[in-house]
Image: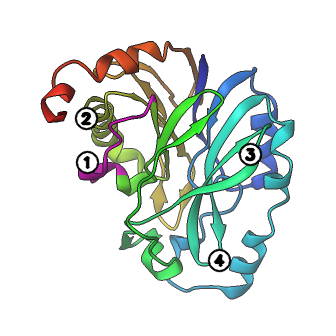
Amino acid sequence: MRVAALGIDCSNPDQTWATLRGLPPVDLLVLPELAFMPWLCATRDVNPDAWERAAVNQHLEQLEDLPARVVIGTRASGRYNDAFCWTAESGLRSVHRKTFLPDEPGFWEATWYERGPVEFQAFDTPVGRIGVSVCTEMWFTQHNYPDVDLVVVPRATPAETGEKWLAGGATHAVTSGAFCVSSNRAESVAGTTMGALGWIIDPDGAVLARTTDAEPVAIRDIELTEARVAKRTYPRYVARD
């Protein structure tokens, strides 16, 4: 199957949409965190009008126009950062609410959003079994997914911490015995520059593809059987009955 990771500017939703419409066909498209809205939590001052505008998102109603069988990202839903999965068969459905929320300059997420329940449930799609970790959640490996083909990680993370996040993505892949696919925002906001590092990592932690400023789209063909075999190999089998 063919997967796509991104490192794109999401400050202008219409431009983001135009970029996505121009992608080649893929089986799985992973979006950056809150891809179709400005990064509201760059400021500590909650703006109800901005919040209300973000909740009305026409692009989420047009995902069937994208060249992908499955699209995964996050959206503002109520007061939650809500992870969603779209497929042609099932339409748009919520699959997880972001649980772990930072609260610091540029990322006042706990100020803007409510914390979701500590529930990390895998789900089936036409392209495999998937688990979602939204950005910061990736670091809490006690909530890994032992029974998935892919872990997807929508992110909004600073450029200067990119290599640390890449190492964390490799760890997430190894502990889950799954491919890890992550997309990141790439824009400057409130003095913070988010870095265009998205990735596709195999179940043993090898980086198969990564985005750069010059190449903001990474596409790779992967074999899900590698993830299914990985569950029976070290270190995964040690924790199994």
Classify 126 as above or below 64.
above
Local secondary structure at mark 4: loop
Residue 206 placement (x, y as % from top left): 32, 19
Callout 2–callout 4 Cβ contact below 8 Å: no
Disc 1 target residue? 141
Q: Report, in whole angstroms, how far the alpha carbon at label 4 lies from the one at label 1.
A: 27 Å
Closer to the camera in the image, 161 or 33? 33
The image quarter in which residue 232 lies: top left
Q: Amino acid at mark 4?
A: Gly
The image quarter in which residue 104 lies: bottom left
Disc with the residue nearer the chain's start (3 vs 1): 3
Part of the protein shown in magenta: 138-149
Q: Report, in whole angstroms, how far the alpha carbon at label 4 lies from the one at label 3.
A: 23 Å
Local secondary structure at mark 3: helix
Q: Amino acid at mark 1?
A: Thr
Q: Report, in whole angstroms, how far the alpha carbon at label 3 lies from the one at label 1.
A: 31 Å
Disc 4 target residue? 78
Residue 117 placement (x, y as % from top left): 43, 70
Disc 2 target residue? 175
